[in-house]
Amino acid sequence: MTLKLLKFKHTVFSALMITNALFFYSQQSAEDLARVPVNSTSNILNRLLLSYDPRIRPNFKGIPVDVAVNIFINSFGSIQETTMDYRVNIFLRQKWNDPRLKLPNDWRGSDTLTVDPTMFKCLWKPDLFFANEKNANFHDVTQENILLFIFRDGDVLVSMRLSITLSCPLDLTLFPMDTQRCKMQLESFGYTTDDLRFIWQSGDPVQLEKIALPQFDIKKEDIEYGNCTKYYKGTGIFSVLSLASECTTLAAELPKVSYVKALDVWLIVCLLFGFASLVEYAVVQVMLNNPKRIEAEKAKIARAEQAEGKGGNAAKKNTVNGTGTPVHISTLQVGETRCKKVCTSKSDLRSNDFSIVGSLPRDFELSNYDCYGKPIEVNNGLGKSQAKNNKKPPPPKPVIPSAAKRIDLYARALFPFCFLFFNVIYWSIYL
């Protein structure tokens, strides 16, 4: 009995203490509110949220809430063919009407309240999500990138910055000349159309200004080469290996599909052209290195020169080497010192201007050497007047068999023409 009485006294005492504390805090808050102007922004926000429940949507058990959506695409990432997705950085804007947030009639301020983003958590908001989203994140540097407006009639405008990775199924039949259509699907996760409806904002719902995917500019430079064909072999093999490596790399990066892509056709044909050029090079080289053909060409040239009465001494001539440096070519005794095979050394002699391919000193003299570096006889006994009167014979030329030369000339015309014809057919089909 005594124990029950003690418990009852303790309960009464606790109730009295709680009542006094509540009365004290209520008096304190009333005094604080009295110091705040009635029409201040803080007081207005406190009055709006006094009976506000963010768990209940606006117009509960009434008409559905219409949410106007506007998207500003800030940046557009590259499309990944391997994962079939793309990444965008956007400003997502949503606007709806919440009658519970109407500003009171005694509010004398502007028609719009710019509210701190922390209040965003205290309001009801649409449960919008991206149906084809793979990954997404908010931005919070240096603060949460959320902008919140409350209008006089209860309209709420929220703008937030998001980075989203969205899936985009690709049809690579015409790759890389394909045109893809990537969707951005916005839906409500928990509400039906009886409660919530998303509509695009009138006017310009999706804004996109000066956005372009990264591209690469290919610079083409034409270079003229001499007859040093030994370097062509490495260039041709390297080109074929590069094309084969490119095919392998693209096959690994692109998704596996059951059809032939436009890029596959392009790479296969380019690989065939590169291989055909190597075959043409091998055929020409075999014909060039045939001793019988070389001796026949030598005899033919010698007979032609004897018939025309040429030979003698060649006058001194200034030419320019491959680097633009003048090369002084002294008087050469053109007789039996002929190149016995096609010139493939660094001192390659061009067929027309007798210029030197390569870098030579300014004082370099070719007086005592032929195109292979072998010493030759020099006849300097002629005077200047006699040298002027003598007709200048043509400089020595590399001995190139006519059949090999014809094949090389035909190939120079045939390969570009065939590739041009292929381009006409290819682009007319895939564009």
Image (cartoon, grey):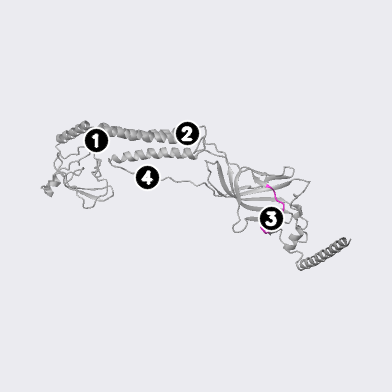
Looking at the image, tell me whether mark 1 or mark 4 is earlier in sequence order. 4
**Residue type at tag 4:** Glu
Looking at the image, tell me whether mark 2 or mark 1 is earlier in sequence order. 1
In space, the residues marked 3 and 2 are separated at their CA atoms by 56 Å
Helix or strand or loop: what does disc 1 sit on?
Answer: loop
Residue most extreme to the right: 1
Q: Is residue 174 left or right of residue 198?
A: left
Q: Is residue 10 left or right of residue 127?
A: right
Residue at the spot of label 1: 400
Residue at the spot of label 3: 120
Looking at the image, tell me whether mark 2 or mark 4 is earlier in sequence order. 4
Location of residue 65 with respect to 278 vertically, above or below: below
Q: Quadrant of the N terminus?
A: bottom right
In space, the residues marked 1 and 3 are separated at their CA atoms by 85 Å
In space, the residues marked 2 and 1 are separated at their CA atoms by 41 Å
**Residue type at tag 3:** Phe
Query: Total number of numbered labels?
Result: 4
Looking at the image, tell me whether mark 3 or mark 2 is earlier in sequence order. 3
Of tags 1 and 3, which is closer to the observer? 3
Residue at the spot of label 4: 221
Of tags 3 and 2, which is closer to the observer? 3
Q: Which mark is residue 428?
A: 2
Q: Which span is picked out in magenta?
A: 115-127
In space, the residues marked 2 and 4 are separated at their CA atoms by 27 Å
